[in-house]
Image (cartoon, grey):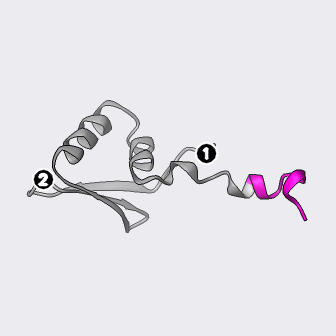
Amino acid sequence: MPRPHGFSYTHRADGTVVITHHGRAAGTLRGARAERFLAEVGAGDAQLVMARWTGAYKHGNERAARNHPRNRR
């Protein structure tokens, strides 16, 4: 699976965290979820953490799966 890229996040003054992917909003976290996210980003690979929190970590293999002989029609 390719390494996720293009994610960034903004921590607003009101405690809200907005995660973007290539400039488009991918998720908004508030309260305890935002705090857990910030702790996890600080402890690990930020791109992978943001991909996982937005649900985008599953993407990236669709093209390879489509070209597999079993899936060609």
Asked if residue 13 lies left or right of residue 4, the reply is left
Q: Is the magenta stretch mostly helix, strand or loop?
A: helix
Q: Name the residue under label 1.
A: 2
Bin the neighbour count of mark 2 within 10 Å (Cα to Cα): few under 14, some 14-19, many 20 and up: some
What type is the residue that disc 2 sits on? Gly
Asked if residue 56 lies left or right of residue 2, the reply is left
Q: Residue 44 carries which label?
A: none
The residue lying at 46 percent from left, 52 percent from top is 55
Whether tag 2 and tag 1 are in contact, CB under 8 A, the answer is: no
Q: Mark 2 points at which residue?
A: 15
In the rendered image, residue 5 lying in the magenta stretch gets the answer: no
Which quarter of the picture shows residue 24?
bottom left
Residue 41 location in percent, x, y? 31, 39
Give the residues in magenta.
64-73
The residue lying at 40 percent from left, 42 percent from top is 49
The residue lying at 38 percent from left, 42 percent from top is 46
Q: Is mark 1 on a helix, strand or loop?
A: loop
Q: What quarter of the picture does the N terminus occupy? A: top right
Name the mark nearer the viewer: 2 or 1.
2
Q: What element carries label 2?
A: loop
What type is the residue that disc 1 sits on? Pro
**Closer to the camera, 52 or 11?**
52
